[in-house]
Image: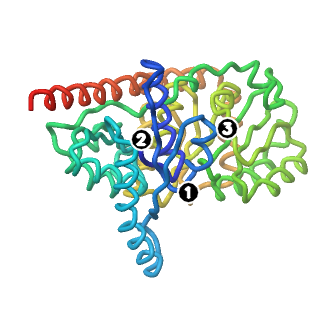
Amino acid sequence: MIAGGGTGGHLFPGLALAEEFRRRDAGTEVIFVGTEHGIEARIIPREGYPIRFLRAEGIVGKSFMKKMKAAVKTAVSFLDARMILGAVMPDIVIGVGGYASGAIVLMASLRSIPTLIHEQNSVPGATNRILGRFVDRVCVTYQESMPVFPMGKTFLTGNPIRMKILKGDRESACRLFSLDKDLFTVFIFGGSSGAGSINRVMVDALNHLGELRDSVQFLHQTGEKDYQGIRDAYRKAGMKGTVAPFIYQMAEAYAAADVVISRAGATTLAELTALGKPAILVPYPHAAGRHQEFNAIKLREMGAAQVVLDHEMSGELIAQQIRAMREDARGLREMQKASRGLGTPDACSRIVDIAMSLVKNTVVKRKRT
């Protein structure tokens, strides 16, 4: 059982783990647990996995009344978790972050079901901080987050990515997105729901890239809210490319890209570094503990990315960086090499190894007793 979601940053590592379990044994049954209003409700059925829902909401950053409502739902989520665990009886429960993982992982731990959590960020979230005291194993992406969790059960594994992310083909990707395979391609996305500030600045950046109309093209995931306006802006500027509210085929999107402009969420960075994709990172300014900013700066220091803070971002600056990266082929190759050097494409395998060992040890203990 894999619990969590709310955002793609939590969900997609869970999908990567599910695929690795099934790759090792096609008979493995993987069930997801999330909420009806999280991204998992849309993505998991599309991926062919069953999903159970519990009633939960986030508390951080909410108004007092919304916090009270979320607190009530959190209490109810423990009842939901108890019913789900009783019906499924999983061999292991894995939490991949987010409020949807809290009740089910904690309840599993209290019922002596093997439990493991994965922390994607350098600054652990509130749910995982609490769960770390109860679960059997903790896997983390960054060295910086290890002191937060108990030493004897915490492992540095990296962030799991889906293997198909590594298998995109540029030529077929360009056909899929109606792009020209010979043009310099910039892929822009702000996470699963888009990023309003990046969208707005890109509209302005188009006004500073007029001379590159025939040599640069864009693939832009906008989110549902900004889709129509951004699509119209590209048409008005006469720029080549494809604009979509959401892109399911991320492997192909990365394969088509020469440069990526994105937020600096842990899953995004894991994918970028596994692929060695040069990037212009715009950290989400309200991320807990500024973890996106710290993670992005680490990549910049290693020569793997450029970083623009959200409040410093302008269309002119982004246009300058796109232009500079397009014109510096040698610098782009060096950035690719530096990025790939930071990747951990085997993170998924490491985590599943730990999970399987935990299950086997639990079975042995039960037989002895």
- Residue at 53 percent across and 53 percent down: it is 309
> Which residue lies under the disc numbered 3?
248
User: Is 204 on the left or on the right of 28, as rendered?
Assistant: right
Q: Residues within 10 Å of mark 2 (few under 14, many from 20)?
A: many
Circles 2, 1 touching at the beta carbon (< 8 Å) = no
User: Is 152 on the left or on the right of 308, as rendered?
Assistant: left
Report, in whole angstroms, how far the alpha carbon at label 3 lies from the one at label 1. Answer: 19 Å
Q: Residue furthest front?
A: 87
Report, in whole angstroms, how far the alpha carbon at label 3 lies from the one at label 2. Answer: 21 Å
- Residue at 45 percent across and 75 percent down: it is 69
Task: Compare marks 3 and 1 and give the one earlier in the sequence.
Answer: 1
> Which residue lies under the disc numbered 1?
36
Q: Secondary structure at mark 3?
A: loop
State the residue in front, 267 or 304: 267
Circles 3, 2 touching at the beta carbon (< 8 Å) = no
State the residue in front, 311 or 164: 164
Q: Secondary structure at mark 1?
A: loop
